Each structure stands twice: as C-alpha cells, then as structure tokens.
Image (spheres, rainbow, N blue to C red):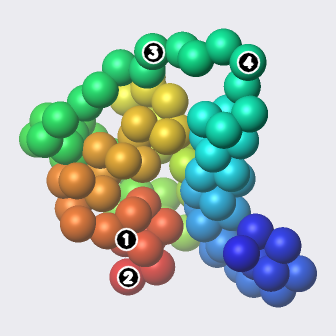
C-alpha cells in the first residue's frame, strides 16, 4: 500500500503516507525487535478538549499539507497512539477524516 501510494504522488496524500509508514514501523518493531518495550495503553479515545484542539487545527490549516506528525505533536504523543485514539474518538483514521 505504501509503495502504491508513493507511485501515485497525489496531492494531500501526505497524511495517509505518514499513517502507512507508521503502521509499517510499528509492525516491524513488534515482530522483529530484540527487546520488547511496554507501550502505554490509552482507552476511550481522545479527551474532548484534545479532540477539539486537533479538529480546530485541521479546520484552520486544511489548505496546507497536514502531516500525522504535526497532529500528534499538538498533543505531545506518538503518531501511533494519536492515530489510534483519533480513530477511537471519531470512528475513522486521521487521513480518512481529512479526505472527508
């Protein structure tokens, strides 16, 4: 999926590419790391205040190339956890929300 998306070079696919790269990195770490690290577990999605902050940012900068790293940095968390919590909160992944 990552290779196919890179070949298409469509505008606005930066967030999707970031998400795919993040999933690939986590998958590689889970299956090929020599040490297992304990990652924090978040439940229930983003708190309403944080979700509103992210949605306001997306709305404000919709005309720009929004990266997954930018959104995660707003809340000072990893891209993986941000993406997972965002999907728990909204029901769709960040790149899907951006496309919609």
Labelled pair 2, 1 in contact (Cβ < 8 Å): yes
Label 3 environment density (alpha carbons within 10 Å; few <14, some 14–19, many ≥20): few
Labelled pair 3, 2 in contact (Cβ < 8 Å): no
Q: Is residue 67 visible?
A: no
Label 3 secondary element: loop
Q: Quadrant of residue 58?
A: bottom left
Return the disc, 3 or 2, that comes first in the chain's sequence.
3
Return the disc, 1 or 4, that comes first in the chain's sequence.
4
Q: Nearer the viewer, mark 2 or mark 4?
A: 4
For the C terminus, the quadrant is: bottom left
Q: In the rendered image, which residue does mark 2 sit on?
A: 100
Q: Nearer the viewer, residue 3 or 59?
A: 3
Taking the image as shown, residue 91 lies to the left or right of residue 23, namely left
Q: Residue furthest right?
A: 7
Vertical placement of residue 41 versus 13, above or below: above
Label 1 environment density (alpha carbons within 10 Å; few <14, some 14–19, many ≥20): some
Q: Quadrant of residue 74?
A: top left
Label 2 secondary element: loop
Label 4 environment density (alpha carbons within 10 Å; few <14, some 14–19, many ≥20): few
Residue 38 is labelled as 3
Q: Nearer the viewer, mark 3 or mark 2?
A: 3
Label 2 environment density (alpha carbons within 10 Å; few <14, some 14–19, many ≥20): few
Where residue 48 appears, as percent x and y from the top left, is 11, 41
Q: In the rendered image, which residue does mark 1 sit on?
A: 97
Q: CA distance from mark 1 to mark 4?
A: 35 Å
Q: CA distance from mark 2 to mark 4?
A: 39 Å
Q: Nearer the viewer, mark 1 or mark 4?
A: 4
Residue at horizontal 60%, vertical 51%?
23
Vertical placement of residue 74 versus 89, above or below: above
Q: In the rendered image, which residue does mark 4 sit on?
A: 34
Q: Is residue 27 visible?
A: yes
Q: Nearer the viewer, mark 3 or mark 1?
A: 3
């Amino acid at each position: 999926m990552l290779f196919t998306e890179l070949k298409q070079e469509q505008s606005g696919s930066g967030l999707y590419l970031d998400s795919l790269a993040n999933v690939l990195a986590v998958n590689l770490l889970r299956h090929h790391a020599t040490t297992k690290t304990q990652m924090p577990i978040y439940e229930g999605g983003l708190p309403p205040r944080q979700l509103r902050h992210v949605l306001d940012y997306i709305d404000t900068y919709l005309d720009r190339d929004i990266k997954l790293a930018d959104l995660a940095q707003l809340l000072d968390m990893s891209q993986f956890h941000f993406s997972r919590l965002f999907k728990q909160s909204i029901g769709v992944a960040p790149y899907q929300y951006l496309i919609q």
